Amino acid sequence: MERKGVRLSVFKPIAQPRAGGDAPDQTTAIVRANSNLPAAEPLKMSHVESLLSSNQKDVLMEEIIANYHASTQDAEVVLVEGLVPTRKHQFAQSLNFEIAKNPER
């Protein structure tokens, strides 16, 4: 798509490093190293877990939507990568659904 002149952007709302913790997100690092596509810095998992455990999902969604708008404003097509459900991140599937419902609120 990039070679065809389509303005593409990759948006990963929340970092999910393989090593766990707040290590750099692998997808974001790969996109930045191998393309000219804009890739916003995803929210750290510790921040997301803190907001969710404090019952502040609305604040989290506002942050995700603000980051989405800031990093994709010039894009014609946006590829959004969600979270992989794991035992540690059991909220991933429902959060992916919330993000996918309407990223342009």
Image (cartoon, rainbow, N blue to C red):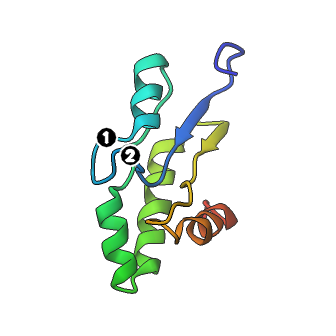
What residue would you read off at disc 1?
24
- Mark 1 packing: few (<14 Cα in 10 Å), some, or many (20+)? some
Q: Looking at the picture, how far across and down is residue 42, in whole percent?
A: 39, 49
Q: Looking at the picture, how far across and down is residue 64, in whole percent?
A: 46, 61
Is residue 37 visible in this depiction of the protein?
yes
Q: Identify whether 1 is placed above or below 46.
A: above
Amino acid beneath label 1: Pro
Q: Nearer the viewer, residue 62 or 18?
A: 18
Classify the position of the C terminus by image quarter: bottom right
Q: Identify whether 19 is placed above or below 103.
A: above
What residue would you read off at disc 2?
17
Seen in the image, is 71 located left or right of residue 77?
left
Residue drawn 38% across and 41% down?
25
- Mark 2 packing: few (<14 Cα in 10 Å), some, or many (20+)? some
Question: How far apart are labels 1 and 2 at the CA level?
Answer: 6 Å
Classify the position of the N terminus by image quarter: top right
Amino acid beneath label 2: Pro
Residue drawn 44% across and 26% down?
30
Q: Nearer the viewer, residue 102 or 23?
A: 23
Residue drawn 47% across and 32% down?
38
Q: Looking at the picture, how far across and down is residue 21, in whole percent?
A: 28, 54
Q: Quadrant of residue 78?
A: top right
Q: Quadrant of residue 39?
A: top left
Is residue 74 visible in this depiction of the protein?
no
- Number of the label disc, if any, that sits on residue 82: none
Secondary structure, mark 2, is: loop
Contact check, label 1 and label 2, Cβ < 8 Å: yes
Seen in the image, is 22 located left or right of residue 12?
left
Q: Quadrant of residue 4?
A: top right
Q: Nearer the viewer, residue 63 or 50?
A: 50
